[in-house]
Image (spheres, rainbow, N blue to C red):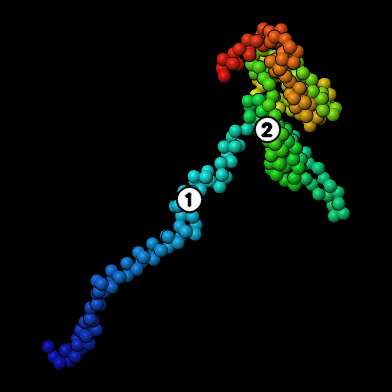
Amino acid sequence: MTEETKAKEAPLNTATEQPAAEAPAVGATDTASADANRSNARGNSRGGDQRGGNARGGERGGRGGRDGGRNDDKDKFIERVVTINRVAKVVKGGRRFSFTALVVVGDGNGMVGVGYGKAKEVPSAIQKAVEEAKKTMFRVPRIGGTVPHLVQGEAAAGVVLLRPASPGTGVIAGGPVRAVLECVGIHDVLSKSLGSANAINIVHATVDALKRLEEPQAVAARRGLPLDEVASHQMLRAIAAQKAGA
């Protein structure tokens, strides 16, 4: 090989020969991983303290979530929206609209109440009506799933007549009266609206009729008579079956 050929190959050999990169020390790697684990643990604990974490989340679950057990209260009652009306107030700049809602609330076991709410939005009006209805609930006497006796209720121009019915008859009533009777838990009844067709008057007339109902025992005690002279045989059998079921 000549001297010129050796001179040409020498720069190529020096360019390809580079020192190998030094491997990181084992101790430095362990220290970096330990620092990362400590920072992750600190972040998890800080997130648990600020955002609730497992402990705070467990407390919320024990209280029934953010609702605080309100879902159980909603499932306990039967709610019926009878009517929703839009009203307007005329002002200088135009008209302002708001909504009114008439709601019947009951437990299906003899308790019922009626509420009337007003708000700028329909859900708010319904919620106000439900709260008012729960505050005005009262107990209705029932015998065998029907009313104890013939009764008539009045409210403004509304007049509603309720008549006892035999088992299997069903609720023979219009929309507003049916909503009240279903919330009470009456399954067999005959009804007739004799006055105004306004839903609000009909509902309040039905409530007035239910408040006029009396149990046979109370009537017998007031008159000073035995129960069999006040109640019919069918009613006596229904009272006996009701006591046996209780």
Judging by the rendered image, the residue that carries numbered circle 2 is: 105
Percent position of residue 211, x then y: 74, 25
Q: Quarter-wise, where is residue 217 in the image?
A: top right
Q: Quadrant of the N terminus?
A: bottom left
- Distance (Cα) linking label 1 and label 2: 34 Å
Any part of residue 189 in sight: no
Q: Residue furthest front?
A: 224
Judging by the rendered image, the residue that carries numbered circle 1 is: 57
Residue at the spot 59% in from the left edge and 34% down from the top edge: 75
Q: How many neighbours does mark 1 have within 10 angstroms: few (below 14), some (14-19), or many (20 or more)?
A: few
What residue type is disc 2 on? Val
Q: Quarter-wise, where is residue 235 in the image?
A: top right
Percent position of residue 147, x then y: 70, 18
Residue at the spot 46% in from the left edge and 48% down from the top edge: 58
Q: Residue furthest bottom?
A: 3
Any part of residue 195 in sight: yes
In the rendered image of this protein, does residue 163 appear above or below residue 128? Answer: above
- Camera-nearest residue between 177 and 145: 145
Q: Residue furthest left?
A: 1
What residue type is disc 1 on? Gly
Residue at the spot 84% in from the left edge and 24% down from the top edge: 195
Say what secondary structure mark 1 lies in.
Answer: helix
- Camera-nearest residue between 236 and 95: 236
